[in-house]
Image (cartoon, helix red, strand yellow):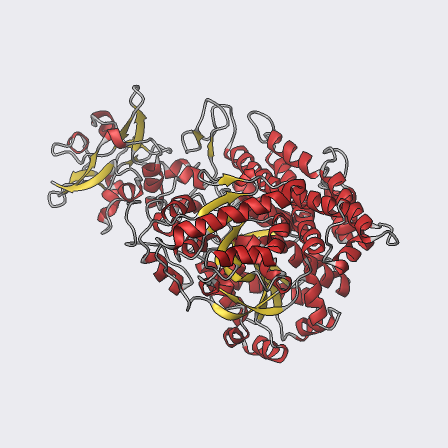
């Protein structure tokens, strides 16, 4: 079944993309969904344990405990904690590398593009503002790194500075203030190993600690440190979809989450001598083609890179289609979501693969492990190898361009800072719209795309349409935004799909009903917006008419993000349960018990209408609580 | 007449067939493995995967035998072979819970229920048009339906 090309691909909310993929002469992840459609029920519900050689043990009516005596509750929580710890580790890896890049940039007096972003961090962290900018940047980077490397028993210093005071107090009461981020991941994986913790509730609280560490450091700080090095997001209109790929250029598809690893190369690609190299082989120059979250990040800051960046092509499960256009000459990857399945496609289309970070090493990619001190030489090597690939492949590889795919006017560059600026430097106009009911509430539709919640981006797009129809404004970050933008929901014209009062708001302000915050890292930005709104009104976050949804969450990182949302006290909708359904206790704690602890709750619903109903109900309840 | 055929060499012991069977016969009105309670004795599966002792598995499914030991030993008439479909069907209301069928099945298929008031046995998912749930759930095609 897996060998059948083009006969039965999964659905996509993006119909032109679905048709393009169905017609490809090669296998993609969209083709493999059917062959993998029978799922192991024990794995699905999280009650398969293979932590020791007695396993795998599975829970059934006649075998309610594993050989060691672990119940369904213990097996489910161990598996869940392991996933959250891994997910947290991924984001902490990203912020660690980003902070090191900032430190090295500061030490070498490199370029600082985000002056305002730096000033904001300096103020927040209590750093001496009279220092020169490089000394300030060094102090910022060192504060972050010092925290990341603390032992687990030593609380991270910046948590109190960054967190909203009522939340910090709540976390302290619950005993979930994290120690050093790396140590938290370490202790997290220790806790869920063979015959260690068998206390499901304690393990769930550990997930919340990991969530806080992930959210404040892995998400929020990665954005802010990148803003310092790469420039701040600015609101503008930009093209999205496969149409951004221009075959007249040497095209490099970038995948991953670590924008700062591209700082040097993206600067170099615009230099005259490098453009001359491209011209010598018949191309007009170089272009970066955005794919996955690092593409979203580049798009967010795209105003600073218009010469080498044409636009974002698509999200994680669009990457195979991007390659299949034939006009991509190389893939530069540095993290997930670089699918293993792109390897045979790259081989077939003679696309050069280069990995900048070995944690995301592809089997047939060349390794150029990024190092700040070697970056200049590495950039030259990478450029030459890509030119080589371009020369080899363009003569023989057929083009399947999709110039009609996507759109030209997606609103992008929205951040906690640019949105406030757009509103005239204050949050009051947005709060007024919410109070008056013109905007009923706010929903963050975030996270990944997967292929099993109705198909590629299907639930994300359907749910978003349902929410805006009910006058709930949607903020998006992650691969969800890649899908929503390619489906046109981030264009001003999408206002027509919104309910009457949200439509009026969008038309008056010239905005889309879905605001594009970019990469999954920017979930941290959404949460900064939530905090700013709560602070302005003078309430705690769980009182806000604001809900979060990761309708098509895919990976462990999303679960760590989700734990941050729950620690913040947000209702979190998921399209599919995160392998916890086998434990009544875990389901009860996450869907009910948490309400009393942090104010958060998990809702699981795969039907977009029912999910929107539940989210709307929560928003209406919270409006009632605020007497609005 | 349809029968479930078995190729033990293809079975990986994932027990998806068992979960599908439990789901197909659950009493709470739900649908889908995600909401199925794996620990309730009432949702016991009517099929079973045994270890063959040689590194493989023995998928045990009701054969709906031509000469059914279970039905032939049923004194109350609760078990009867339907001559049209060929399937051995069970009428719970007529069952005296004597468990002679349990004793007489050469494959060990009928099981006494947890409360001891009846038996659990394959009903071919009540002849649902899409066929038995266990067959649909097998990722290895180790079981399939054949016209005999």
Q: Nearer the viewer, residue A255 or A598?
A: A255
* Corner quadrant of residue A145: top right
Which residue is painted at 34% across and 53% down in the image? A396
Give residue A133's position: percent from left, percent from top: 81, 53
Which of A494 and A609 lies nearest the eye of the viewer? Answer: A494
Q: What is the x, y in percent for residue A224?
A: 70, 54
Left or right relative to A493: residue A441: right
Residue name at image x 77 percent, y 35 percent: A154
Total marks drawn?
0
Residue A158 percent location from the top left of the image: 77, 46
Q: Residue at x 69, y 60 (%)?
A: A232
Q: For this view, does A205 lie left or right of residue A394?
A: right
A59 up-or-down from A545: above or below: above
Residue B116 rendering spot, x and y as whole percentages: 34, 32
From the viewer's side, name the closer residue of A109 and A77.
A109
Which quadrant of the view contains residue B47? Answer: top left
Instruction: Tell me the quarter of the image containing the C terminus of chain B.
Output: top left
Which residue appears at 50% of the width and 67% of the height? A466
- Residue A101 is left or right of residue A323, and the answer is right
Position of the N terminus of chain B by quadrant = top left
Q: Residue furthest top?
A: B53
Using the image, determine if residue A252 lies above or below residue B125: below
Q: Is residue A47 visible?
A: yes
Foreground: A96 or A572? A96
Residue A517 appears in the figure: no
Q: Is residue A547 above or below residue A332?
A: below
Q: Is residue A215 left or right of residue A82?
A: right
């Amino acid at each position: 079944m897996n060998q059948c090309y083009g006969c039965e691909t999964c659905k996509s909310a993006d119909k032109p993309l679905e048709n393009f993929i169905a017609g490809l002469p090669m296998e993609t992840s969209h083709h493999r969904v059917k062959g993998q459609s029978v799922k192991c029920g024990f794995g699905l519900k999280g009650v398969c344990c293979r932590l020791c050689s007695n396993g795998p043990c599975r829970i059934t009516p006649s075998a309610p405990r594993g050989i060691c005596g672990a119940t369904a509750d213990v097996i489910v929580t161990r598996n869940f904690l392991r996933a959250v710890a891994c997910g947290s580790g991924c984001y902490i890896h990203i912020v660690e590398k980003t902070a090191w890049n900032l430190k090295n940039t500061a030490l070498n007096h490199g370029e600082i593009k985000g002056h305002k972003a730096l000033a904001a961090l300096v103020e927040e962290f209590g750093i001496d503002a009279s220092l020169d900018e490089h000394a300030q940047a060094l102090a910022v980077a060192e504060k972050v790194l010092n925290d990341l490397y603390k032992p687990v028993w030593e609380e991270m210093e910046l948590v109190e500075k960054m967190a909203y005071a009522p939340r910090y107090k709540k976390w302290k009461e619950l005993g979930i203030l994290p120690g050093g981020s790396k140590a938290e991941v370490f202790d997290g994986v220790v806790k869920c190993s063979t015959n260690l913790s068998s206390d499901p509730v304690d393990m769930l609280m550990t997930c919340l600690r990991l969530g806080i560490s992930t959210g404040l450091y892995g998400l929020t700080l990665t954005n802010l440190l990148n803003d310092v090095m790469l420039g701040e997001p600015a609101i503008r209109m930009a093209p999205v979809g496969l149409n951004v790929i221009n075959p007249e250029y040497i095209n490099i598809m970038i995948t991953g989450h670590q924008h700062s690893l591209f700082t040097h190369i993206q600067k170099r690609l615009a230099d005259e001598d490098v453009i001359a190299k491209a011209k010598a082989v018949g191309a007009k120059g170089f272009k970066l083609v955005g794919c996955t979250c690092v593409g979203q990040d580049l798009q967010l800051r795209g105003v600073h890179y218009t010469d080498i960046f044409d636009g974002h092509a698509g999200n994680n499960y669009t990457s195979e289609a991007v390659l299949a256009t034939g006009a991509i000459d190389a893939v530069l990857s540095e993290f997930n979501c670089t699918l293993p399945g792109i390897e045979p496609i790259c081989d077939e289309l003679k696309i050069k693969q280069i990995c900048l970070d070995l944690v995301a090493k592809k089997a047939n990619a060349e390794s150029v492990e990024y190092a700040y001190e070697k970056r200049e030489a590495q950039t030259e090597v990478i450029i030459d190898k890509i030119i080589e690939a371009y020369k080899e492949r363009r003569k023989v590889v057929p083009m399947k361009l999709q110039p009609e795919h996507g759109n030209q006017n997606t609103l992008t560059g929205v951040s906690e800072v640019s949105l406030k600026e757009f509103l005239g430097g204050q949050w009051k106009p947005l709060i007024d719209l919410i109070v008056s009911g013109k905007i009923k509430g706010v929903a963050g539709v975030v996270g990944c795309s997967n292929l099993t919640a109705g198909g590629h981006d299907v639930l994300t797009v359907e749910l978003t349409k349902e929410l805006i129809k009910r006058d709930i404004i949607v903020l998006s970050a992650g691969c969800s935004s890649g899908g929503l933008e390619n489906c046109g929901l981030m264009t001003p014209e999408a206002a027509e799909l919104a309910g009457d009062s949200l439509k009026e708001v969008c038309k008056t302000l010239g905005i889309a009903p879905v605001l594009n915050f970019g990469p999954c890292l920017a979930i941290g930005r959404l949460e900064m917006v939530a905090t700013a709104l709560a602070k302005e009104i003078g309430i705690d976050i769980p009182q806000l008419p604001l809900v979060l949804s990761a309708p098509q969450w895919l990976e462990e990182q999303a679960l760590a993000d989700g734990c941050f949302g729950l620690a913040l006290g947000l209702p979190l909708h998921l399209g599919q349960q995160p392998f916890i359904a086998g434990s009544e206790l875990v389901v009860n704690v996450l869907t009910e018990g948490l309400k009393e602890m942090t104010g958060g709750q998990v809702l699981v619903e795969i039907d977009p209408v029912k999910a929107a109903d539940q989210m709307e109900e929560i928003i209406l309840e919270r409006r009632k609580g605020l007497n609005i | 007449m349809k029968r479930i055929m078995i190729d033990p060499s293809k079975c990986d012991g994932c027990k998806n067939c068992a979960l599908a069977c439990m789901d197909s016969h659950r009493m709470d009105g739900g649908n889908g493995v995600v909401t199925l309670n794996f620990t309730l004795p009432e949702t016991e599966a009517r099929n079973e995967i045994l270890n063959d002792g040689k590194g493989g598995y023995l998928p045990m499914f009701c054969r709906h035998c031509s000469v059914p030991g279970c039905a032939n030993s049923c004194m109350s008439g609760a078990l009867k072979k339907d001559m049209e479909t060929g399937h051995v069907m069970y009428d719970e209301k007529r069952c005296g819970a004597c468990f002679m069928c349990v004793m007489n099945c050469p494959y060990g298929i009928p099981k006494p229920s947890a409360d001891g008031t009846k038996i659990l046995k394959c009903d071919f998912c009540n002849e649902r048009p899409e066929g038995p749930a266990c067959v649909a759930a097998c990722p290895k095609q180790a079981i399939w339906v054949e016209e005999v």
